[in-house]
Amino acid sequence: MKITLEAVLPAEIERRSMELIEQELATQKIVLQPELAPVIKRAIHTSADFDYARNLVFSPGVVQKGRAAIQNGACIVTDTQMTKAGINKKLLAHFGGEVFCFMADEDVAQAAQAQGSTRAAVSMDKSLTLNRPLIFAIGNAPTALVRLYELICEEKLKPELVIGVPVGFVNVVESKELLLQTQVPHIVARGRKGGSNIAAAIVNALLYGIDK
C-alpha cells in the first residue's frame, strides 16, 4: 500500500490542523458560537476528538471572564504536573500570573494521609493560602473538583474560573455535575472525557485569544 504524506512545513502544521478541524466540523454540520470556537477547536486539536464540540459546557460569558481574569494577573492552580507543563507559562507571566501544582508538596502528602483524603483534595485547600485571584484547571482528579465545590459552597473560595475536565470512570461525571450547580464561571467537559492535556489546552486557548 502506497502512503502519500502531505507536505507541510513545521510552522504551518497548527494552521493546517485548524483548517482540517473546521472542514470536519462543517462536514458534521456543527456550528460553533464564535466566542467559544477557539476553546473548542483547541480541545479538538489536542485530542483529535470531535466530541468536545458537543460535551464542553460553558457558563454565560465565561470566555470573556476568564480572559479578563488572566489580564488582571490571575494565577492557575492545577491538579497535575502535566497540565502545569502544558500551559504557556511565559505568556501567562506576561500578565503577571503563575501556575501552581501542589501535588508533590510534602505537607500536602502528610495532610492527605492524616485526613484519609487525597492529595488532589488537600491541594485545593492549600490554594486558599495564595491570596490571589485564581483559575482552577482540573484535568485528572474528581476529588479536586468535589473539594472545590465544597469550598465554594462554604464561601471559603470564589474562583475566577473553574475548568473542570477530569477524565475517568469513578465519580468523574458526578463531580462535574456538582460544579455545574454552582454560580462560579466554569468550562466543563460533561461525561467521562477530559484529561490534563485538555485542561492545559483550554487555558492556552484563553491565553492565545487575548490581544497583546
Image (cartoon, rainbow, N blue to C red):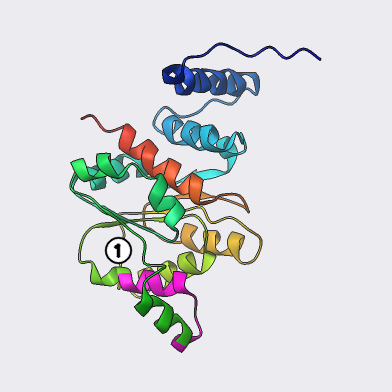
Height in image: 37 above or below 89? Answer: above
Q: On the rendered structure, is 150 left or right of 27?
A: left
Q: Position of residue 157 (x, y in %)?
A: 30, 68
Residue, far front: 2
Residue, far right: 1
Q: Position of residue 6 (x, y in %)?
A: 60, 12
The kind of secondary structure the magenta stretch mainly shows is helix
Assign the N terminus to one quadrant of the image: top right
Height in image: 182 above or below 96? Answer: below
Q: On the rendered structure, is 181 left or right of 184?
A: right
Identify the residue shown where x is 52% and y is 43%: 56
Identify the residue shown where x is 49% and y is 75%: 118
* Quadrant of residue 4 within the rendered picture: top right
Q: Which residue is mark 1?
A: 158
What amino acid type is highlighted by mark number 1?
Answer: Lys
| SS state under label 1 | loop
Q: On the rendered structure, is 85 left or right of 134?
A: right
Residues drawn in magenta: 114-126
Identify the residue shown where x is 54% and y is 60%: 177
Q: Position of residue 113 (x, y in %)?
A: 47, 84
Height in image: 60 above or below 134? Answer: above
Within the magenta stretch, is there residue 115? yes
